[in-house]
């Protein structure tokens, strides 16, 4: 939804005037934003139950109550922040920042952090602990990030940050849902088209119903009609509803300190993703605060970042393995008439749904495959964003940033296949695998610390394209240090795990420095190649 820029004084009153807690426009924003948040909660519940195979009592009795608490704290805080701004400026059109579970990071923590731990230990509770530790680290990155985020954002090409994220979107987010959608196409494929018609095609459904809600309703209708007609589909039915009703009740969140501390044994796996994605959160939050400012509502960036970190920390201490974030879309909710009431009301609604066990009943009514097109859509969106939001000439850098994550995903598939056959790559032997065209050792090297590795390689390529050889040399030097300590291109943190790769990065840094002066004197050939950014200004 687009919104015209609103000047700070467009709807004003006397400074200090108390604005209303609720306006008619808050109903519109509550329906739209509340539905958005509810869909996200259903998706993360599906990930926990059907991807990570977590026990129902842990999901509905521990994790979701903590998630609801975090979302309520966040949305109520941003409603208060909006009210404070309205009273300070004397305006009545101030709209609260939308916030909730960070959707990209929802998939990152599940597929990049928790899933590998689950595959290694076969224990979903160990995976849960790793997720809590991941959020714990990210919370402090967010709280400290107000001071370093501008610097990181300034020196790192956007193509590298978004390209590394796109690698995750294409592999760990999109591939499994795609396979499951075509396993049950009567629900999955139909729901995918319902979503694409709305979110990409711009078609508005009757009564302004969100595309995600329509897709879920259509998927549930198909599944229930087929099941009641004697063709079970989608895992729904009276039996499932009866079982879900057993979880209906009052569930208060309880501290999860032992589980959190247990996750620290996987700190090596966690750090290589928590830090770069914490930085991504910082950049995203700054962008969204700037978007709100352009719509007339200027919120303090430091307080926003600190709030995200604090509420995420509270959530993980109580058992929630998902990070909180300010959402994009503030101008849209404001144009819809939302002020501050819609934000607080959404938080209270989510608190009620998660504490009373209603989510379990919804999951028994809605087939999980009806939710998967939303995951695929997110994967498509994040992957496309890397190319759309980066300069056209940096497209090769985006592709290079994808490669480590694709390699890591390929290695996971090989490991899973060999594990299902009761063996491992080491038992089969690297030579035999290589003779069969499976370059397992190479995939392990390229994909080690894939997220950080993608950022380093993507930055190298983008800076070389821009002929910023000195800056590229600096990133190569950072790559050498990270490799030396096992943070990238290695399967575990440690000193000199892959010394040849570390030395190779160092050699690249020297080589780039040697050509830095020549790059300043010679013309930039990339600007003359039509294939890279046709029509771009030099």
Image (tube, helix red, strand yellow):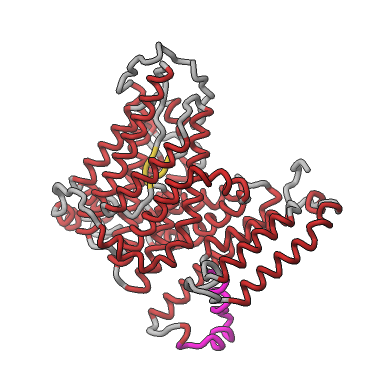
- The answer to which of 376 and 328 lies nearer the viewer is 328
Identity of the residue drawn at 86% across and 53% down: 522
Q: Total label count? A: 0
Give how far across and how far down residue 332 sits, in percent.
46, 30
Image position of 513 with respect to 39: above or below: below
Identity of the residue drawn at 63% across and 58% down: 458
Is 143 displayed left or right of 22 in the figure?
right
Which region is colored magenta?
A: 427-448
Give how far across and how far down residue 92 sits, in percent.
39, 18
- Can residue 190 be seen in this snapshot? no
- The answer to which of 487 and 385 lies nearer the viewer is 487
Is 172 displayed left or right of 363 in the figure?
right
Give how far across and how far down residue 11 sits, in percent.
44, 15
Q: Quadrant of residue 348?
A: top left
Identity of the residue drawn at 50% across and 62% down: 171
- The answer to which of 241 and 482 lies nearer the viewer is 482
Identity of the residue drawn at 62% across and 72% down: 502
């Amino acid at each position: 939804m687009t919104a015209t820029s609103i000047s700070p004084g467009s709807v004003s009153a006397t400074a200090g005037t108390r604005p209303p807690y609720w306006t008619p426009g808050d109903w519109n924003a509550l329906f739209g934003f509340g539905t958005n948040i509810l869909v996200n909660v259903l998706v993360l519940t599906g990930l926990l139950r059907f991807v990570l195979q977590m026990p129902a009592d842990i999901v509905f009795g521990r994790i979701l109550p903590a998630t609801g608490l975090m979302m309520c704290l966040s949305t109520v805080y941003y409603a208060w922040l909006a009210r404070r701004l309205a009273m300070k400026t004397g305006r009545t059109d101030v709209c609260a920042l939308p916030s909730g579970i960070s959707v990209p990071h929802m998939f990152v923590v599940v597929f990049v952090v928790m899933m590998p731990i689950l595959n290694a230990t076969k224990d979903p509770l160990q995976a849960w602990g790793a997720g809590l530790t991941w959020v714990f680290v990210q919370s402090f990155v967010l709280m400290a990030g107000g001071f370093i985020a501008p610097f990181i954002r300034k020196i790192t090409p956007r193509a590298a940050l978004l390209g590394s994220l796109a690698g995750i979107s294409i592999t760990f987010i999109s591939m499994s849902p795609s396979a499951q959608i075509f396993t049950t196409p009567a629900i999955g494929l139909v729901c995918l088209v319902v979503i694409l018609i709305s979110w990409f095609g711009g078609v508005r459904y009757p009564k302004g119903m969100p595309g995600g809600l329509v897709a879920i309703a259509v998927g549930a209708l198909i599944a229930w009609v087929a099941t009641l007609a004697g063709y079970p589909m989608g895992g729904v039915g009276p039996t499932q509803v009866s079982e879900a009703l057993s979880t209906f009740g009052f569930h208060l969140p309880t501290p999860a300190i032992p589980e959190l501390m247990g996750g620290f044994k996987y700190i090596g796996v966690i750090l290589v993703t928590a830090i770069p994605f914490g930085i991504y959160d910082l950049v995203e939050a700054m962008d969204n605060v700037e978007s709100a400012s352009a719509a007339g509502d200027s919120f303090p960036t430091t307080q926003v970042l600190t709030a995200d970190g604090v509420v995420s920390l509270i959530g993980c201490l109580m058992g929630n393995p998902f990070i909180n974030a300010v959402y994009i879309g503030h101008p849209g909710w404001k144009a819809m008439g939302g002020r501050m009431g819609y934000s607080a009301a959404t938080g209270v609604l989510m608190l009620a749904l998660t504490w009373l066990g209603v989510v379990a009943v919804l999951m028994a009514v809605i087939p999980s495959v009806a939710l998967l097109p939303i995951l695929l859509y997110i994967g498509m969106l994040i992957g496309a964003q890397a190319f759309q939001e980066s300069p056209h000439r940096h497209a090769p850098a985006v592709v290079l940033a994808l490669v480590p994550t694709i390699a890591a995903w390929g290695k996971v598939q090989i490991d899973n296949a060999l594990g299902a056959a009761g063996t491992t790559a080491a038992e089969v032997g690297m030579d035999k695998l290589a003779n069969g065209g499976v370059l397992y050792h190479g995939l392990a090297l390229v994909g080690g610390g894939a997220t950080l590795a993608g950022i380093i390689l993507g930055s190298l390529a983008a800076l070389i394209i821009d002929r910023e050889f000195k800056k590229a040399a600096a990133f190569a030097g950072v790559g050498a240090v990270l490799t030396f300590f096992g943070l990238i291109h290695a399967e575990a943190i440690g000193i000199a795990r892959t010394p040849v790769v570390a030395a190779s990065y160092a050699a690249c840094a020297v080589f780039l420095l040697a050509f830095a002066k020549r790059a300043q004197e010679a013309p930039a050939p990339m600007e003359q190649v039509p294939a890279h950014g046709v029509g771009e200004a030099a």
